[in-house]
Amino acid sequence: MEAPPDNDVLWARSLHFSHRDGSPGLTGISLGVREGEILAVSGPRGSGKTTLLRCLSGQVPVRCGEVWFNSAPVHTLGPMARERLRRDRFGWIDPEPVLVPELNVWENAALPLMLRGTGRRRAKAAAREWLERLDIGDKARCRPHALQHAERQRVAIARALATGPSVLFADEPTAPLHRADRAHVLRTLTAAARSHGITVVLATHDAETAALADRTVALLDGRCVRTVHLPDAPEPEGRAACSLSV
Amino acid sequence: MLALRLTRAARPAVQLRRLLVAAAAAGTGFLLLSCLGHALDHPEDAGAAALRLAWCAVPLAATVYFALAVARTDPGTRPRPGLSAVGLSPARLMAVSALTTALSCTLGSMLALLVFLHLRGDLTGMPFDGAAAGFLAADQPLPLPAALTLLVLPPATAAITVALALRPRDPRPATPDRRGFGRFGAYRRATARETFGTYGRFGSRVTRRTTAGTDAAGQPGPLRTTGSTDATAQHGAGSTAPSAARTGDPAGDVPTGGTPAGLPWGVALVTAGLAAQSYAGDPAPAPSLAVLLGWLLTATGLVVAGPGLTHLCGRLLQSVRPGALRLLAGRVLMTEATRIGRPLGVVCAVASAGYAMAVLYDDPSPDFGPLTALGALVVAGCTVATLLTAAVEARQCRAETIAALLRLGAPASMLRGAAALRTAALLALFGPLVLVVGALSALPSAR
């Protein structure tokens, strides 16, 4: 058995996963995530990006294949141990910013810290610091419904970063945003990750987003692919003739 | 047909709720039929029969309330965006919902009729040696139109109420649009507008003073009143409206974070009711009109004050430097105050009435017959079941948030602990309240 590189913080080996109804999710994925890198998992919709992230972060039990985190197996852990691992070492960003609507912004950002048992004062300080860094410090006392969508997404990012996770899983964090918001969110996320040495696994279907990452793993139909050969868009005939500017 | 299929293909918990509705309707129907039997038995005493029939309004109201709560939580009639295109639109779903309710209640009514006929001995001879023959007018023929009219009452009322409550409505702002008075009036929040240079000319970078400003200036976040919330919602309508539409609660009863306003009114009503009862004096032979009025006022007051008390409970729970557990428990209670508080107020009213009755009639009084017991059982069971159903509804509404918390790694035991903490806090507040109200209302009569 080949030993993985020393600086891999998270790796998967021949990961298979099928959904509960039997439809195939992942078919034999092997990849390694190095310490402190930003790894983009790219691929079209339905290629298994979210499933891969859910397997790697221990949200779903892995039946076939292996997932290792810091040289410790994740695939053999029980639900409670995986939950503790998620709480203490991992961060997660949803495509939609699912904040707790009853709590205000800084309480939302401080919630994972409080769940870990950090004191309220320290949790608040850390959350406020990250909210300031993500340009939403002035809205720290608002409820989530008073915020715009991009602001809510930034709160979700602050919530994920405030705990200082070892690995941050971002599942298409910019999918519902416009391009200006998208660039802002991505820039803050990658800058924060690089400055704090946080490993990021970023699922995206967007080539521009993937360009920000250190490395890209392309998925197609639940498999890692090196090259994707898609048919070129055929040149439409008579486009110039139909132009309005004639 | 669609309603039948949707009804049949539900999970056991849902079927159990529907069966409970049927049971409540059966109890109410039997009470109505026994009123008919009593009237047949005593054709000379019309006033007493009318009074009995009037008392049946209480179980009927409890049944309808329960049926409405069950219809709200019915997953079969949840809005389905994908099926709207094939004709399962919100209006159709409302009809399905009303029809399902009518089905359950009709089942109950049929059951009541069967039991009634059986006890009268119309089906298989007299059971129980004719013990029930006295108040069921067993020796007289049953007027079928009257019985059917009475039996149609619970299904029709429940179906109409469900249809009215679940009719599709557009999401709208919580308050009607208020006239803007420009810079002159005091109602509009003064926003310092950038009037210089390109920003001013094109209206860009208009300072949006959102709740951050008001919160910093006035109250902290959780204490925000509904007024400022609505103003914020209107102010940033472009941003909040789509998200509100996406979360898409069709009934528009998304609980806002504001404080329920009913607490002072409720306290005033309860006090007035207790005062009316104490001034009514000694109602030894029969409860007078003033006592009934006092009870009505007290019960209304408890129902009106329920959301406010629940909100207060949640606020107390999350006060003074809360950790994650108390924060989640208290804030959820504050948000769900209206949903949980109303049924809780009803349960509180029924329980205090029961306590007062138990204090007043500690010896089994002669007029406390099986029918009174059945009525009390129907009312108490319906109100408690409504409260539990409201809790289920709140849980359904929060399912997405709970899933997100679990993804974050929040321990499931902590979420259960928060729920237990909420229950304990509500019991600690409402238990003594029931005892106090019951004891106070029994006090003047027991003198």
Image (tube, rainbow, N blue to C red):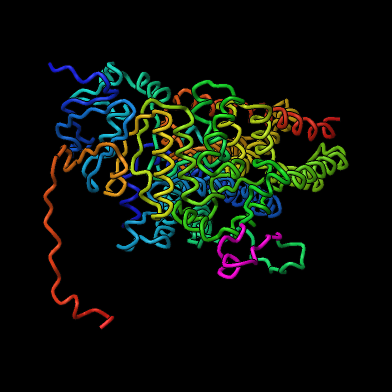
Look at 49% across and 32% down and name the residue there. B128
User: How far from the left and from the top, in percent, is residue B68?
Assistant: 51, 49
Task: Tell which of B350 and A9 is nearer to you.
Answer: A9
User: How far from the left and from the top, in percent, is residue B47?
Assistant: 71, 53
Look at 74% across and 28% down and name the residue there. B359
Residue B427: say if magenta. no
Residue B193: say if magenta. yes
Classify residue B371 by image quadrant.
Answer: top right
Task: Tell which of A130 and B375 is nearer to you.
Answer: A130
Relative placement, left or right, of A243 versus B437 is left
Classify residue B95 by image quadrant.
Answer: bottom left
Q: Which residues are magenta?
A: B189-207
Relative placement, left or right, of B129 versus B88 is right
User: How far from the left and from the top, in percent, is residue B12?
Assistant: 36, 37
Relative placement, left or right, of B131 versus B446 is left
User: How far from the left and from the top, in percent, is residue B361?
Assistant: 73, 29
Image quarter in which the N terminus of chain A is found: top left
| SS assignment for the magenta stretch, majority | loop
The count of marks equals: 0
